[in-house]
């Protein structure tokens, strides 16, 4: 199998093809089923490479000389194994396959010899490196820790007393075996509520503007200032998304905002989201300045209010590479912790 004959570049002309496969997949609030995620995660080959047959769509990126399969869609069978074998032979290195649901993991184990890049224990919240991890710190990239899915109408209710809020949260919660005990969840809510009210007491005007093509330069400057010289790769990771957001994601599927406060001319916050289905959105960029106490938490509530007005009820924050990122996201009290797996093929 020669790779050039198998693969073709992902381009903006493929958007309808991907939308069709996302719809066929019929998953709810699936973070990986988005144009923003596929084209971000398939780094190393522009927007990525693809292998396509009418019932199979495989997206391919590169990581430190390894091929990376991102959210395979459709019928996983012998063709998929043949593709992995060809990629393994071409690179001379194992292949990472990310954003897999449990049924896909089970199917792959029927077809070949696969290893977990990492193992997550939901009851303890601990992560253990597999035989061949993605990285020495992020064992399975953003599949190291589970995706967090928020019910935005519950998360943003900062005016409720903790007991009343927790009663509503418990009714919506989908992971009774979560590593987060009730006492910790209540404390998360108390802190979140405190920070939101902290900013509100300052009585500083804040507004959200729709992110437009004319905002690219200002947002890029804000992101550069936020991350600083020492974290320049973070800035570069957002650059292509800033431009492609308007050219490659349809108007009715994208949510982009810049945040502004009184007394500061430049943006102080930035959000990009893509609609995953009728009721859910994935968050693919959320960068907020700590210009005022409680502002990040307040802005989160403000953004969720905007999404709610558009008929959105679920917000998937994605998975986390490290415990620090995981802990930061936990303060929003997700109703579902969805563990997506990364497998490795071709370990000798």
Image (cartoon, rainbow, N blue to C red):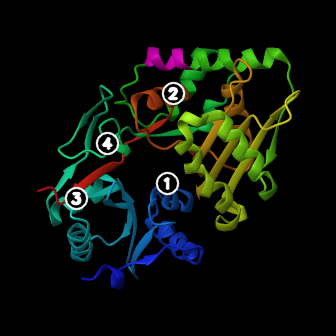
Q: Which residues are magenta?
A: 182-188
Left or right of 53 in this view: 190: right
The residue labelled by disc 2 is 328
Q: Is residue 305 visible?
A: yes
Q: Is residue 133 magenta?
A: no
* Callout 3 touching callout 4 (CB < 8 Å): no
Closer to us: 154 or 199: 199
Q: Which residue is mark 4?
A: 135
Quick one: SS at disc 3? Answer: loop
Please tell me how crowded label 4 is: few (under 14), some (14-19), or many (20+) other residues with Cα within 10 Å. Answer: few
Residue beneath disc 1:
28
At x 88%, y 27%, the residue is 263
Tag 2 secondary structure: helix
Question: Quick one: SS at disc 1?
Answer: loop
Q: Which residue is mark 3?
A: 94
The answer to whether one can see residue 159 in this image is no
Asked whether residue 184 is drawn in magenta, I would say yes
- Residue extending furthest front? 229
Q: Mark 3–mark 2 contact, CB under 8 Å?
A: no
Look at 62% across and 37% down and name the residue there: 152
């Amino acid at each position: 199998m020669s790779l050039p004959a198998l693969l073709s570049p992902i381009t903006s002309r493929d958007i309808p093809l991907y939308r069709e496969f996302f719809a066929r997949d019929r998953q709810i609030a699936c973070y990986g089923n988005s144009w923003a995620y596929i084209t971000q995660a398939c780094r190393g080959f522009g927007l990525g490479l693809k292998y396509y047959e009418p019932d199979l769509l495989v997206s391919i990126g590169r990581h430190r000389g390894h091929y990376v399969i991102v959210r395979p869609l459709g019928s996983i069978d012998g063709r998929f194994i043949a593709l992995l074998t060809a990629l393994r032979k071409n690179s001379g290195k194992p292949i990472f396959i990310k954003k897999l649901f449990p049924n896909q993991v089970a199917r792959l184990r029927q077809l070949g010899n696969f290893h977990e890049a990492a193992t997550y224990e939901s009851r303890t919240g601990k992560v253990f490196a597999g035989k061949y991890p993605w990285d020495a710190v992020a064992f399975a990239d953003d599949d190291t820790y589970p995706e967090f899915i928020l019910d935005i109408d519950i998360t943003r209710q900062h005016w409720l007393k903790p007991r009343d809020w927790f009663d509503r949260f418990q009714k919506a919660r989908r992971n009774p075996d979560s590593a987060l005990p009730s006492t910790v969840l209540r404390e998360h809510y108390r802190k979140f509520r405190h920070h939101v009210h902290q900013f509100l007491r300052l009585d500083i005007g804040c507004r959200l503007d729709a992110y437009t093509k004319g905002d690219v330069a200002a947002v890029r400057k804000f992101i550069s200032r936020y991350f600083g010289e020492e974290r320049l790769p973070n800035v570069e990771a957002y650059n292509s998304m800033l431009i492609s957001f308007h050219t490659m994601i349809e108007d009715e599927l994208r949510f982009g905002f810049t945040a502004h406060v009184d007394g500061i001319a430049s943006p102080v916050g930035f959000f990009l989201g893509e609609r995953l289905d009728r009721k859910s959105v994935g968050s693919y960029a959320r960068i907020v300045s700590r210009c005022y106490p409680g502002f990040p938490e307040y802005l989160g509530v403000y953004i969720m209010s905007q999404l709610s007005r558009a008929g959105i009820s679920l917000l998937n924050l994605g998975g986390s590479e490290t415990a620090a990122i995981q802990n930061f996201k936990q303060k929003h009290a997700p109703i579902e912790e969805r563990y997506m797996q990364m497998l490795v093929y071709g370990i000798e």
